[in-house]
Image (tube, rainbow, N blue to C red):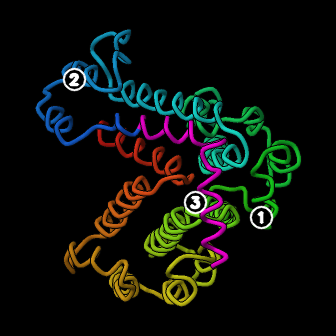
Amino acid sequence: MEYLNVLAQSMMTFNIDDGFPEAIIRGFRKGILNKTDYSNLEQCEVLDDMKMHLGSTDYGEFLQNEPSPLHTVTISEKCTEKLVAEFEYIRAQSVEPLSTFLNYITYGYMIDNIILLITGTLHDRDMNELREKCHPLGIFEAMTTLCACQSIADLYNHVLVDTPLAKYFHASALTEEDLDEMNIEIVRNTLYKAYLEDFYRYCKKLGGVTAEVMGTILEFEADRRAINITINSFGTELTKDDREKLYPEFGLLYPEGTWKLAKADDTEQVRQIVESYSVYSGLFSETGHDTSDKSLVDALYEYEVKLNQLSFDQQMHYGVFYSYVKLREQEIRNIV
């Protein structure tokens, strides 16, 4: 009864601060490419044909100043610029607690950018070149000084201490020895684990429909990362104990399923473990028992899209902002 009262109160007051941003994001969502658009794109023979068709969609004349012949990377960059512009417009219209929620969405991109710069620095790549490859949603002022860092301690004390990611480095208890090529993926997954757990707690604290919708989405993301970490660890030097430490400590698979994943020796065992959960059983049954690792990941990927589509079926919650970004990203990958 108390939960229903809180839910009713939140719905009654939601539109005061967040009604306009939600209306805008739902308007943006109307512009996502549909089946007819994709059917037309499939008929294109050259990239200039795609340019002409995309000009008739919500993308508009976003490629009109680009000379021919077009390149795939150019289309990808321009599509991403559109997504970032829309996201920043929404962020400019937001107030707390939506502002913090939107910031949380960018933290994952920050982690990816930091890992990209560290990896590039270890391979003596040009910093300007690396900076251009960073995702715009994960840009922060101190990024260019990352190349001067020689240890996790330097990274934390001189760069990340003033960023939102500082707490994830601290919570992960990363050491100076972790900043090398062999451990870089472990660092990435360790940071993501701390980030997802923090984001999940924040969404639950918000309560209401946001907690319900985002709880489902983030629980799936935690499960997917556990599955991917398990599959990608086969044939590597990562021990089963170290593998288990990288799993987010929430989700439908946690704790029994992730404990079993930590003991798995091959992909077939992963399939059997995951299929014992009714939510995921139908996903892998569609792919057949001789499916490659990639198909397992793809099945989960398609399920993520469905969850993000379903978030728009409910109103007055923040999940639509997260889902829109993810659906636009999928659209960009489809175009590419």
* Residues rendered magenta in the picture: 1-28
Which residue ends up furthest to the right in the rendered image? 157
Q: Amino acid at mark 1?
A: Leu
Image coordinates of residue 262 in percent, x first then y, are 53, 84
At 57% from the left and 60% from the top, the residue drawn is 210
Residue sitting at 63 percent across and 35 percent down? 91
Q: Where does the image place residue 51, in percent across and percent down from the top left?
A: 26, 20
Q: Residue at x 60, y 63 (%)?
A: 8
Q: Nearer the viewer, residue 74 or 34?
A: 34
Name the mark on residue 53.
2
**Callouts 2 and 3 close, C-beta under 8 Å:** no
Q: Secondary structure at mark 1?
A: loop
Q: Amino acid at mark 3?
A: Thr
Q: Earlier in the sequence, mark 2 or mark 1?
A: 2
- List x then y, in percent, for residue 224: 46, 69
On the image, the x and y values in percent for residue 154 come to 85, 48
* Residue carrying label 3: 210
Q: Give the SS element for disc 2.
A: helix
Task: From this view, report whether residue 110 is shown above or below residue 228.
Answer: above
Q: Label 1, label 3: how many angstroms apart (C-alpha)?
A: 32 Å
Between circles 2 and 3, the one closer to the viewer is 3
Label 3 environment density (alpha carbons within 10 Å; few <14, some 14–19, many ≥20) = many
* 229 over 166 or under it: above or below: below
For marks 1 and 3, the one nearer the N-term is 1
Magenta segment includes 320: no
Disc 1 target residue: 174
- Label 2 to label 3, Cα distance in Å? 36 Å
Identity of the amino acid at label 2? His
